[in-house]
Amino acid sequence: MATHSSTITLIVVLFTLQANGFLLDTVLNHLPHKVCYGDLGCFSNGPPFLDLLHRPLSVGPESPSTIQTRFLLYTRENGRQERVLDTSSGATMESSGFSTSRNTKIIVHGFTHNAHRAWVQNMTKELLIAGDFNVIAVDWQHGADLPYEQATANTRVVGAQIARLVQVSGADANTVHIIGHSLGAHVAGYAGERLSHLGRISGLDPASPYFENMDIQVRLDPSDADFVDVIHTDDGGLKNLGFGCTQELGHVDFYPNGGQKQPGCAGDAVDKLGSTSWAALTTLFDFYAEEETLACSHERSYMYYIESINSVCPFTAFKCPNADDFHAGKCLSCKGDTCRSRMGYHADKYSTMGSLYLETEPRATFCDYNYLINISTVNNFDGKLTLTLTGSNGTIGPTPLMEKNEPHLYNTIISKMFRSRLDIGNMETLSLHYEKIGTIIVSGSYPDDWQLLGISIWKADEQKRTSFKAYHKEVDNHNTTVFCAYGHSC
Ligand SMILES: [Ca+2]
């Protein structure tokens, strides 16, 4: 009986949907077709937007009247108050408070978000502290809603609308910088594709589902602007159910903490689903994108970016083959300015290209300074060392340099990376506390008290070395030994 009534209910629902044309529209929207929206042009959902492997469901974008994109302008001049831009002409834009004498920053949100999200407002605030800009927050929330596949298609219309805004404004495209999160990063790509020499796009964890490994016409790529910088924070892709792209999309791609899972984000949605099917990924994206706490790694991209705008700490990132080598301190030394950059707002101050790595704190403030200590010894060493470093700006530590007992031979250098929110300034003294744990069987060749040849600390953010007076100084088990920096009187 229950089955019978369920069947009737299903038939009634299907009939109602069909009567309203909903089902028919949905089916038709998935068939290859083209829609045209006036001066924005026509949009086909066929190849390259249809791809059996990466975008099996391709729909056409909804109309501008459905998406209802609004451009919200903020300037120092209008006291940071929001004004809805009238984009019908350059004159109406000027009367709304836009000025071609200022550089322009355009912020584009992603799936299910809107321009009044705290992060968009915080980014606006920080940008206006940094410079006298036209800051435009693009609100396309009516096109950014469920289902995900429709929102991905709508990004093309929003991108075209942004390109038209730039053209109508009379501003030089190279004075315009678009910052987009998730789907918003691809919106920026579509805008840039239509403009000659858009100045810059910053892609913040560009959305992966339906974009990763697609043609460059479909996704953000370096041809979309004169400079494209990308931050990857949740890049697991299909395999690991990450929301962000793994592949390089810009001139420079930053992979903080390896780019996949961010520290302080243990409860990501990706941990909560054991499936790896495509349907599961897009459904998951639909379900969790709203939940900032559950999509924590994906959201970290804009949190890092916002902090980077006015932070004194530089978010220095280094070219490296992979995150493990970076963590081991193998990539902190580089000659010239082509092997490092700054993640975030100041990335355009360097000409470094390719994949760059850095690590962050689990909570704000996220930025750390990077240090590498090099210790060379007369004897074999085993045990654990804890470092305390004092400089003109304060003290770092005590910081354990080893997590567990580590043996090192006398002719090798003990090299350890450590990070701190503190810029130590001029280094003054360094102390090492030594605990011998005694797991080396041949104890005679690993003495309790050992002698040093030298200690130096590499301040990677400045590419500057400080050496300490350590030659033939002895470090004793259970004790702390203090060393004085060369050039400092102590
Ligand atoms: Ca592109």
Image: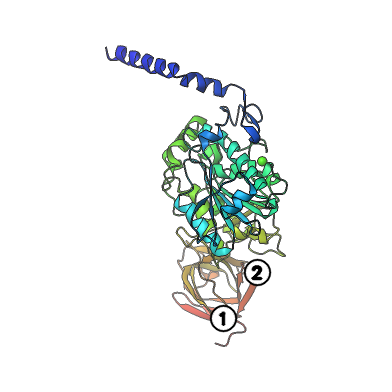
Q: For the residue carrying disc 2, how many other residues have a C-alpha within 10 Å: few (<14), some (14-19), or many (20+)? A: some
Q: Which residue is mark 1?
A: 473
Q: Is residue 154 visible?
A: yes
Residue drawn where x is 46% and y is 60% of the image? 364
321 versus 467 height, above or below: above
Which quadrant contains ligand 1? top right
Q: Label 2 is placed on what type of residue?
A: Gln
Q: Are marks 1 and 2 in contact (CB under 8 Å)?
A: no
Q: Nearer the viewer, residue 184 or 241?
A: 184
- Residue 398, horizontal then vertical, whole percent: 46, 71
Task: Tell me the quadrant of the picture where the N terminus can be found.
Answer: top left
Q: Which residue in the structure is indicated by mark 2?
A: 463
Quadrant occupied by the C terminus = bottom right
Q: Which mark is residue 107?
A: none
- Residue type, mark 1 in image: Lys
Query: Is 489 rendered above or below residue 408?
Result: below
The one of 403 and 41 positioned closer to us in this rendering: 41
Place residue 378 in its image quadrant.
bottom right
From this viewpoint, which residue is outermost toward the bottom?
489
The spot of residue 184 in percent (x, y) is 56, 44
* For discs 1 and 2, the disc positioned in front in the rendered view: 2
Which residue occupies 56% across, 81% down? 473
Q: Residue at x 53, y 69 (%)?
A: 446
Q: Which secondary structure lies at badge 1?
A: loop
Q: Nearer the viewer, residue 289 or 27?
A: 27
Residue 38 at x, y percent in the picture: 63, 32
